[in-house]
Image: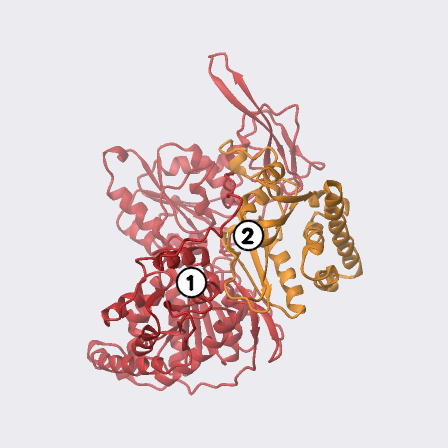
Chain colours: A orange, B red
Amino acid sequence: MSKVTNILVVGIGGQGVMTATEILAEAAIALGHDAKKTEVAGMAQRGGVVSSHLRFGPRVLSPQIAPGTADVLLAFEAAEGLRWQHMLRPGAIALVNDSRFVPPIVELGLFDYPADPVADMKAAGTQVVAFDATTIAQGLGDIRLGNTVMLGAIADHLPFGADELLACVLKRFQRKGEKMVALNRQAFAAGRAAVGEAQAATA
Amino acid sequence: MAAVMPAPAASRLLMSGNEAVARAVWEAGVKVAAAYPGTPATEMLEVLSTYPDVYAEWSVNEKVSLEVAIGAAYAGSRAFCCMKHVGMNVASDALMTLTLTGVIGGLVIAIADDVGLSSSQNEQDSRYWGRFAHVPVFEPADSQEAYAMTLAAYTLSEKFQVPVILRMTTRINHVKGLVTVGERLSRVGAGFQKDPSRFVMVPGNAGKRIPLMFQRDKALRAEAEQSAWNVIEPGSDRRVGFITSGPAYMHVKEVFPDAPVLKLGLSWPLPFEKCRELAALADQVVVVEEVEPLVETELKAQGIALLGKEILPLQGELAPPVLKPAVARLLGEPVEEAGPVVRPAQIFPRPPTMCVACPHLGVYYTLSQVRNLNIAGDIGCYTLGAGHPWQAMDTCVSMGASMGVALGMDKGRGESDKDKRIVAVIGDSTFLHMGMQGLLDMVYNKANVTVMLLDNRAVGMTGGQDNPGNGRDIYGEEAPRVDFAKLVEALGVKKERIHVVNPYELPTLFKTIREEVKVPDVSVIITDQPCVLIKDYHKLKPFEVIEDKCTGCGNCLDVGCPAIHVTRRAKEVKPSGREVDLAFVRIESSVCTGCTLCVQPCAPGAIVHYAPVSPIKLVSKEGCSA
């Protein structure tokens, strides 16, 4: 049976989850794969939960990733990583931005935000690599670079090379000038390095 | 949106179902396209407006959009209209007679069913419109098919002079897949040819058209029997065969790659003989359809032995995790535990929120502070007012329903609500869509209702589309702008009962609402500040909280702005002995846009400008009299 790769990208409406998945899809297509990308958009754009599914391979039928079959989970927010960890296949990896976006429903005291979502994931047996993409992006001077940091983070966990993905990322910023291209190149490298370092630290 | 150069023919593009349909509509040489925004259908027209040589419009509602398309099709041009499933309910009056006149230029109606309710008030199966209105229905299974079937639908529409429905679901509209595109057809319509016996549907004329419609049904069924869109894949594992359509086909193929399958692409009229052929190939047959048992019921009536909703749910998507165990149980096989090794985490829900500085925050904060209200709500971003912390909306039914429901609540008062004040809350675009008639009804029938007309100059929930209330058309060009104060006055609301209020000025808003709910008449309070996501909105200097000054009272949290975060919680015992929960806060200044809504209820004056103070500037009230 032909192998289809399942990548699940999750976060909060407005974080750029759908764009990140689209860039991943473009990279897969550039390499000759068939690809389908799906999410439930609509109200999710307003601070709600967003989960974006990407499936690619020789031929993709159903666009949805079934629970327990994701090959990689890329989480833009810590609690969202925890929310979707059951989607991973046994032994697969979760790459989690360990920064928190606490919703009004928690601020109002109606629900609790988990004390340590990444620890909860590890306790459940999930293989997690956590890093702080938000701080990295701020360090580079623009929080909006977080999206590219996240794509750098997944770059070494794909069935194709990081350069393919980087090319697709930079293509998006070509029209915005050399400076933006250089910044995004830096952000991508920083995301890659952050995951590499976090993995080395736990190895 | 400005027109752009469309991608050249033979390009292979990553497109959503909506983008694929828009491309095909353009290629089909369509001249007129009309729609009202609605998730998940909205992008079809948005994208179409970027193509050259096609007239696109945002219509005020779905019925008008269909009528615009009908006019163009009568004139011999190809026409398109699209809507979400509930939009078709609104447009159906036109459809049920359109089917008698038929069309000259091809007319395709794309209907997006929100299977799984990602952004809708109900879940409907629009395939029934095909049976009800005696018109053919196509059901694409991915973006490439959405593209190809749209083109095929125009050919079929003109061959039989019949409007054609393209039935999509969220899992087609919003899924991106690869599409190979083609050339635009150059097509000039013949022009309108007068024919009262066909186009003037009075009883004498309509009665003669009905037998023609039934004849057409027969011809269309024969077409479906030999259509290349209805394909049998014989398979090799004959234990269960499937009859399926739309995205469910992909799920069937994913889970049962070797089973016999009849894929219905042109699913109405049903090709009975092809269904019998499939049934003969397999020991058992299961119909996999989202969401109602339409095909199943029809085929059972034909005497074909099969299963459907006995083993599959009547609600939601029939994705592999649903389909696989259902069929395994049917075959008496063990239900495979292919599922997760890790259980889903039990954590807080994260419902959609209103935006930072949304003008609706001021309205709902105020409504939540006024006692003794029953609030009839409506459909838009402001439906979120039913949620926390405001809980200031008590009903939500259909577009414009707040008007009629409020009137009915007023006239139908029971013992418990004889002293209640009735309020209706409706947005600008919803009001223009279907609210005006309800307001007229209220005035005419002497209601005691206060209407909150939230004019944020955008169709907010679907992404801020333009509408007659904001003075721009679908291309972003200047268009006549409705004056809401004059409009409601023309509908009969007394001038002294009409107030235009800035929703960021809480004391004025509070005073106006409290006074108007006491007046036994129809009042309309119009709020006039724009959606924060559109270009009319101007950011102001952000705020921050002085930590030492915050007393933890939590008043600011009651505004419901997502930029306010709790830093610590504590408990305090009041002199009366009552224990009070305290929540000390901070403001995420990087996202705060300085609307002042949290500043106003802050008693200790702990919220100050993050940057040096400058005068607060809100957008002008131009365009609103009163």
- Dividing the picture into quarters, in which one does residue B305 lie? bottom left
Gap in angstroms between the C-alphas marked 1 and 2: 32 Å
Residue A57 appears anywhere in the view: yes
Tags 1 and 2 both on a single chain: no
Screen quadrant of the C terminus of chain A: top right
Q: Amino acid at mark 2?
A: Ser
Is A35 in front, or is A168? A35
Q: Chain of mark 2?
A: A
Q: Is residue B535 above or below residue B47?
A: above
The spot of residue B118 in percent (x, y) is 45, 53
Give the crowd class for mark 2: few <14, some 14-19, many >=20 residues within 10 Å: many
User: As shown in the figure, which amino acid type bears the numbered disc 1?
Assistant: Val
> Is B141 situated above or below B461?
below
SS label for mark 1: loop
Q: Which SS class for mark 2? A: strand
* Left or right side of B611 for B526: left
Mark number displayed over residue A51: 2
| Above or below A47: residue A105 | above
Q: Which mark is residue B504?
A: none
Q: Position of residue B591 (x, y in %)?
A: 64, 43
Q: In terms of depth relative to the viewer, which is nearer, A116 or A88?
A: A88
Left-right relation of B413 to B121: left
Q: Quadrant of the N terminus of chain A?
A: bottom right
Residue B60 disc label: 1
Closest to the camera, between mark 1 and mark 2, is: 2
In terms of image quadrants, where is residue A122?
A: top right
Chain letter for mark 1, please: B
